[in-house]
């Protein structure tokens, strides 16, 4: 019979103050988890509102101006408050030091500071929402963003502040991975999740400052009219797009790389088989990180940039498919002849494989110049990035959450209800977004308040999908919260994993390990190591 | 590494020995410096774009910057980097009084830099050589002269913010030196402050020729 250790990081020390001033990476991870899930809820409510408005053409629940604000807030909140911090700050914070066999991250105070900075950024964003809101889309394109009303400066300030939080996390993780690995853990004995978090951190460190300066320039443009994005003053609005996407394209890999890391953990554990192509998966994370800095121009094919530039960017964009393909094929090869255990995390891993592949392949349509001209700014693009971001990252986040949940909180959630939740989310997602691929190819433009009558049936299906999706999330929230008190104790190693976090208690003590961990096998040595699940 | 030995007070619980802690802190600082370079990198890019678009204007406009004051400021900052380096050296050899003298010199030189910058700025404001839509000066030939001053003020302004930030951190180091936080064994914070200060200096070394020595 599994038991919960009497003293663990969750109950010792006690009190709100001990949480708000904690330097323990696990507690900071939990604080972050609560924060990003709150943001996810808020962004999700906005998403349902968008779909409600688009249920029929014309006005359903809000006017066009409100609609512009709602989709902007949906995008900005989901991207800057949920998916960019997402997996690294919540799951990474908890498990990265555990996986390395470390007692904490390299800079615990910086870690806590990054959470407070995140909260300040979120509060400024809330202030922006209530003091006039923003209707620019999450991209803040000039000249619209310099001329429209509303709280653009406050919103850019919020994003600027959130950038610091992201950079601090990145710095912390890189240094931790370099300097705090357990004795015997060489680079190629690290779990692949660590490799992907490392590649992510490099992008956070190298791209985020450029977003910072972009937002400073945008704010200056708006406040004092420095003119560098204003064509009437000899400035160049397309320069803003270059600046913006130099960050924001790499940022989509900040979103997806940690997700790929989670999948690299889930698939070998639930196939009970050594991962296929460890080094190829590790290197491909860096391949993706490297190429991510060279492809920003594919967001600007119709911006008026030179045709030569577009051709080069198009070519480089196709290169991303290579390391991404390497990963997908290696995961699939790992499944081959594995003894597959269909627990909820694995269901999410399969959802990821399926949906991310669709998201990735439809990206090629958009990277191709001729088809992109037709598809730009249609619902095809909306469907594509939701398949990557939600079908990819959110599925992996949920998979990782269900995988590490028993480690974080010591208890199991209801297996039956979690399967129902997964099925609803998978179904709801596809009903919502598969229809949007079709809408896009038929020419329905994104971001519009209303649409022609011919798009009515598909929009209706899409909105119904959003309700199924919402139901799935509500069920998930209920059984997860329920498990915190009522769940069965999970034991140290519920899934039979071989990485170090499964060698300590669930939940772990404040110091992570009772005795300093010793590495006796590689992270995926299922052929040689003997391990049994404790549930 | 012997874990049973007594641990010095400055050693955080999750590091096994002082060397590991020092290496980690330094690596973190170097990464932070990289982010700073990329932050200014955006401005260097904007500079390049607009200088390419308006080469004659940049040449004409740069003559309105005060080369003498700019040169003096360059010397002031380089000297402050020297005093900062000496402060680190003094801590390493355990000379508290010297450390304080050098830290105060660095602070004083930073203040001189800002005062000179203040006089340069107020002169420009007086003449209306201001960024973007506030530009009212009429004596510069070429296309879009206001852009030059947009870039000048943004670059030097952001740099000045970094000087002020550096001064705050150096003041903190003065306080901690007073309180005997540092010794010949433990001086990492002061060393990292030095790294940051050299970065701020180095950025100016690029700003100076780009803005004051065009053509």
Image (cartoon, rainbow, N blue to C red):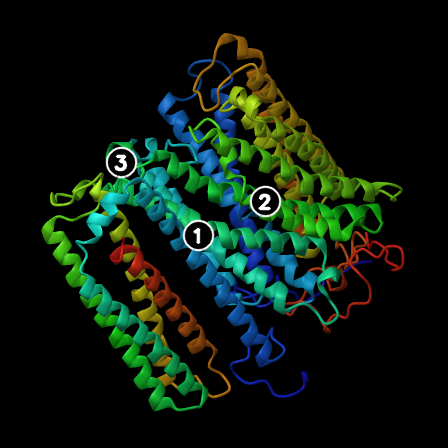
Q: Is residue A474 visible?
A: no
User: For the view shown, which residue lies furthest in the top direction?
Assistant: A453
Could you tell me which secondary element the residue under label 1 belongs to? helix
Determine the secondary structure under disc 3: loop
Q: Closer to the N terminus: mark 2 or mark 1?
A: 1
Residue neighbourhood size for the residue with mark 3, other residues' Cα within 10 Å, grouped as few (<14), some (14–19), many (≥20): some
Circles 3 and 1: CB atoms closer than 8 Å: no
Q: CA distance from mark 3 to mark 2?
A: 32 Å
Do the residues marked 2 and 1 share a common chain? yes
In three-dimensional space, the C-alpha distance between marks 3 and 1, rounded to whole angstroms, equals 25 Å
Q: Where is residue B182 drawn, in percent x and y?
A: 44, 84
Image quadrant in which you'd find residue B11: bottom right
In the image, residue A396 sits, relative to residue A440, either above or below, namely below
Give the image location of residue A278, x and y in percent: 77, 52
What residue sits 54% from the left and 76% below the top?
A: B22
Chain of the residue where label 1 is placed in the rendered structure: A
Near-viewer residue (B84 or A58): B84
Q: Is residue A43 above or below residue A59?
A: below
Check disc 2 and report its element: helix, strand or loop: helix
The verdict on a common chain for dots 3 and 2 is: yes
Where is residue A185? Give x, y as percent.
73, 66
Chain at tag 2: A
Residue located 50% across and 62% down the image: B31
Q: Is residue B5 above or below residue A512?
A: below
Query: Which label lies toward us, 2 or 1?
Result: 2
View extreme (front): residue: B215
Q: Nearer the viewer, residue A462 or A16?
A: A462
**On the same chain: label 3 and label 1?**
yes
Q: Which mark is residue A234?
A: 3
Q: Give how far across and how far down residue B93 sits, in percent.
A: 44, 90
* Residue holding disc 1: A209
The residue wearing badge 2 is A291
């Amino acid at each position: 019979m599994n038991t919960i250790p009497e003293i663990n990081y969750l109950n010792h020390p006690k009190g709100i103050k001990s949480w708000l001033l904690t330097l323990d990476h696990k507690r900071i991870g939990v604080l972050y988890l609560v924060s990003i899930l709150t943001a996810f809820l808020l962004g999700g409510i906005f998403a349902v509102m968008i779909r409600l408005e688009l249920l029929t053409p014309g006005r359903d629940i809000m006017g066009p101006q409100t609609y512009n604000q709602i989709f902007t807030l949906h995008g900005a909140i989901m991207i800057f408050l949920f998916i960019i911090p997402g997996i690294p700050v919540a799951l990474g914070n908890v498990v990265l030091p555990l996986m390395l066999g470390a007692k904490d991250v390299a800079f615990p105070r910086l870690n806590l500071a990054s959470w407070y900075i995140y909260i300040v950024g979120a509060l400024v964003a809330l202030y922006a929402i209530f003091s006039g809101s923003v209707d620019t889309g999450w991209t803040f394109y000039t000249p619209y963003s310099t001329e429209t009303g509303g709280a653009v400066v406050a919103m850019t300030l919020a994003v600027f502040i959130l950038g610091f939080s992201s950079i601090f996390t990145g710095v912390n993780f890189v240094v931790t991975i370099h300097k705090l690995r357990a004795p015997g853990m060489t680079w190629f004995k690290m779990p692949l999740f660590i490799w992907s978090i490392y590649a992510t951190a490099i992008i956070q460190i190298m791209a985020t400052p450029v977003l910072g300066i972009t937002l400073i320039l945008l704010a200056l443009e708006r406040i004092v009219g420095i003119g560098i994005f204003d064509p009437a003053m000899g400035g160049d609005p397309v320069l803003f797009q270059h600046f913006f996407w130099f960050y924001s394209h790499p940022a989509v890999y900040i979103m997806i790389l940690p997700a790929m890391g989670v999948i690299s953990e889930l698939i070998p554990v639930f196939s009970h088989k050594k991962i296929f192509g460890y080094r190829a998966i590790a290197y491909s994370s860096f391949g993706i990180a490297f190429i991510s800095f060279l492809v920003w121009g594919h967001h600007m094919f119709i911006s008026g940039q030179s045709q030569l530039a577009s051709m080069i960017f198009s070519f480089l964009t196709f290169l991303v498919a290579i390391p991404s393909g390497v990963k997908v094929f290696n995961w699939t090869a790992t499944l081959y002849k594995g003894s597959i255990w269909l627990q909820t995390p694995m269901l999410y891993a399969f959802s990821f494989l399926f949906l991310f592949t669709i998201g990735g392949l439809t990206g090629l349509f958009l990277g191709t110049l001729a088809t992109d001209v037709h598809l730009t700014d249609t619902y095809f693009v909306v469907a594509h990035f939701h398949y990557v971001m939600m079908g990819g990252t959110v599925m992996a986040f949920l998979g990782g959450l269900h995988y590490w949940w028993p480690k974080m909180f010591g208890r199991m959630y209801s297996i039956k209800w979690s399967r129902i939740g997964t099925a609803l989310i998978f179904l709801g997602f596809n009903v919502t977004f598969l229809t949007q691929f079709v809408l896009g190819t038929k020419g329905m433009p994104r971001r519009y308040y209303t649409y022609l009558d011919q798009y009515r049936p598909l929009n209706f299906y899409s909105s119904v999908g959003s309700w199924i999706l919402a139901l799935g999330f509500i069920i998930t929230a209920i059984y997860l919260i329920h498990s915190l008190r009522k769940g069965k104790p999970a034991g140290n190693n519920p899934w039979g994993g071989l990485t170090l976090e499964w060698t300590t208690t669930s939940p772990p003590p404040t110091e992570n390990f009772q005795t300093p961990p010793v590495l006796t096998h590689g992270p995926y040595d299922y052929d040689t190591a003997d391990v049994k699940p404790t549930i | 590494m012997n874990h049973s030995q007594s641990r010095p007070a400055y050693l955080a619980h999750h590091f096994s020995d002082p060397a590991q802690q020092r290496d980690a802190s330094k690596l973190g600082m170097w990464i932070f410096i990289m982010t700073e370079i990329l932050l200014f990198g955006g401005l260097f890019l904007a500079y390049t774009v607009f200088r390419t678009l308006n080469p004659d204007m940049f040449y004409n406009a740069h003559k309105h910057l005060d080369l003498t004051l700019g040169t003096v400021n360059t010397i002031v900052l380089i000297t402050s980097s020297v005093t900062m380096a000496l402060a680190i050296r003094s801590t390493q050899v355990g000379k508290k009084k010297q450390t304080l003298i050098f830290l105060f010199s660095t602070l004083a030189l930073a203040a001189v830099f800002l005062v000179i910058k203040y006089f340069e700025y107020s002169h420009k404001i007086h003449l209306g050589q201001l960024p973007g839509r506030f530009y009212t000066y009429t004596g510069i030939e070429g296309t879009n002269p206001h852009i030059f001053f947009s870039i000048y003020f943004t670059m030097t302004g952001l740099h000045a913010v970094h000087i002020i930030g550096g001064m705050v951190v150096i003041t903190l180091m003065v306080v901690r030196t007073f309180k005997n936080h540092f010794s010949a064994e433990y001086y990492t914070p002061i060393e990292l402050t030095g790294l940051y200060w050299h970065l701020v200096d180095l950025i100016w070394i690029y700003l100076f020729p780009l803005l004051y020595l065009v053509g």
